[in-house]
Image: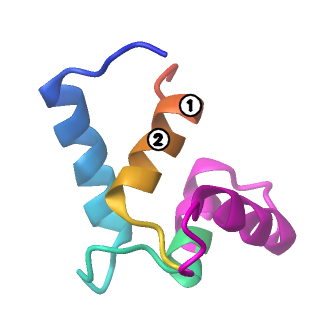
Amino acid sequence: MTELSQEEIAEIKDHFDFFDQDNSGLIDIDEFTQLLKILAPEASQDNAIRGFATIDVDQNEQIDFDEFLDWWKMNWTVF
């Protein structure tokens, strides 16, 4: 996996902040479902639940920025 520049990380942080609708610094399952509706409109609720569980590495039912960044780098940086 290639290293991201500070500008790229800042752009990804902007995406994270956009979906962190309550400004908690974390993305919950509802916010992730909204994110997935935009990035993958054909995804089902089951896809959202499974995806969320995969990204939530520490299993605290929240996605923090580090978890989000790792996921984004693996799945979306090609776009």
Q: Is residue 55 left or right of residue 41?
A: left
* Identity, as a three-letter code, of the amino acid under mark 1: Met
Q: Which residues are magenta?
A: 34-61
The answer to which quarter of the image holds residue 52 is bottom right
Q: Give me the residue at 14% from left, 28% from top.
A: 7
Q: CA distance from mark 2 to mark 1?
A: 6 Å
The numbered dot on residue 70 is 2
- Residue at 56 percent across and 31 percent down: it is 74
Residue type of the residue flagged with mark 2: Asp
> Is residue 24 placed above or below 50 in the rendered structure?
below
Q: Position of residue 18 (x, y in %)?
A: 30, 64
Q: Is residue 67 above or below residue 76?
A: below
**In the depicted view, which residue is nearer to us: 27 or 66?**
66
As for residue 30 lying within the magenta part, the answer is: no
Residue 43 counted in the magenta span: yes
Q: Secondary structure at mark 1?
A: helix
Q: Which residue is mark 1?
A: 74
Counting from the top left corner in percent of width and height, residue 30 is at: 56, 83
* Chief secondary structure of the magenta portion: helix
Relative to 13, is 37 above or below? below
Q: Is residue 9 above or below residue 32?
A: above
Label 1 crowd (10 A; few <14 / some 14-19 / many >=20): few
Point 69% across, 67% down: residue = 53
Please state if 43 lies on the left or on the right of 65 as rendered.
right
Residue 54 location, quadrant:
bottom right
Q: How many marks?
A: 2
> Answer yes or no: do the residues labelled 2 and 1 have beta carbons within 8 Å?
yes
Rendering coords of residue 25 (x, y %): 26, 74
